[in-house]
Amino acid sequence: MIEQELINIWKYSSKQEQVKFDKSKLLIDLQTNLDKIEKSLKSRDRRELIPAIVMIPVFGFIAFFIPFILSKIGAALIVLWCIYLIIRIKNLKKYKPIVPSETYLNYLYKTREYFLIQKKMLDTSLYWYILPCLTGVLLFLIGFNMSYERLTVNIIGTIGLGAIIYIMNKRAVKKEFDPVINKIDEIINVLNE
């Protein structure tokens, strides 16, 4: 009933009031999408940070006590990669916009910049995330004296996991970040009119 009443009010209102209603609907839709993505980003950060924090002492211990040189180098690279990952994810928070303190338009510009940075991070994950980790893991595995069959399976599995992560990141950019950035641009254009 209320929805029908709102539709009738919208139909019989003046053009100026309809535009205000359309703007507010756009803003509500955008805020819903932003909240959803922000929740997803927090979840992703936890999924990345907790294992990285756990892996630092584990691979540090392994690097110190394991007798194989290549495995020591691989474990040390994994520790360095985990530290870099933690720093990189923590540095993203400085770009996160705070609740609109100035104008909503400035908030939208800052939000757009924040999502562009997140998008760029996912687009370039092959270089800063996947390849350094794969290098450390592969060196770690190669250092052990295992059969070629087992080593081959481990290497293929590691590279396959890296490929899956890369595909998931590209999909997240296409399905989540691009539509929200486009919606922010659309609302910025509407508010500038």
Image: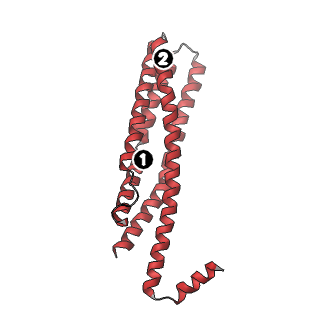
Q: Quadrant of the N terminus?
A: bottom right
Q: Are marks 1 and 2 in contact (CB under 8 Å)?
A: no
Residue for badge 1: 123
Image height of 140 relative to 39, above or below? above
Image height of 185 relative to 165, above or below? below
Tell me where residue 108 appears, x and y as whole percent.
38, 62
Asked whether 129 or 100 is in front, the reply is 100
Instruction: Assign a secondary structure to mark 2.
Output: helix
Instruction: Assign a secondary structure to mark 1.
Output: helix
Residue 98 visible to the viewer: yes
The mark closer to the camera, 1 or 2, is 2
Q: Quadrant of the C terminus?
A: bottom left
Mark 1 or mark 2: whose residue is earlier in sequence: 2
Q: Is residue 35 left or right of residue 104?
A: right
Tell me where residue 167 appears, x and y as whole percent.
52, 45
How many other residues sit within 10 Å of disc 1, few (<14), some (14-19) or many (≥20)?
Answer: some
How many other residues sit within 10 Å of disc 2, few (<14), some (14-19) or many (≥20)?
Answer: some
Tell me where residue 80 appears, x and y as whole percent.
40, 27
Asked whether 127 or 186 is in front, the reply is 186
- Give the image quarter of residue 76: top left
Numbered circle sitting on residue 59: none
Residue for badge 2: 61
Tell me where residue 127 appears, x and y as whole percent.
40, 38
Residue farthest along the front direction in this orientation: 101
Asked whether 165 or 115 is in front, the reply is 115
Tell me how far mark 1 sits from mark 2, CA to CA.
33 Å
Identified by mark 2, the residue type is: Phe
Identified by mark 1, the residue type is: Asp
- Give the image quarter of residue 102: bottom left
The residue shown at (45%, 84%) is 17
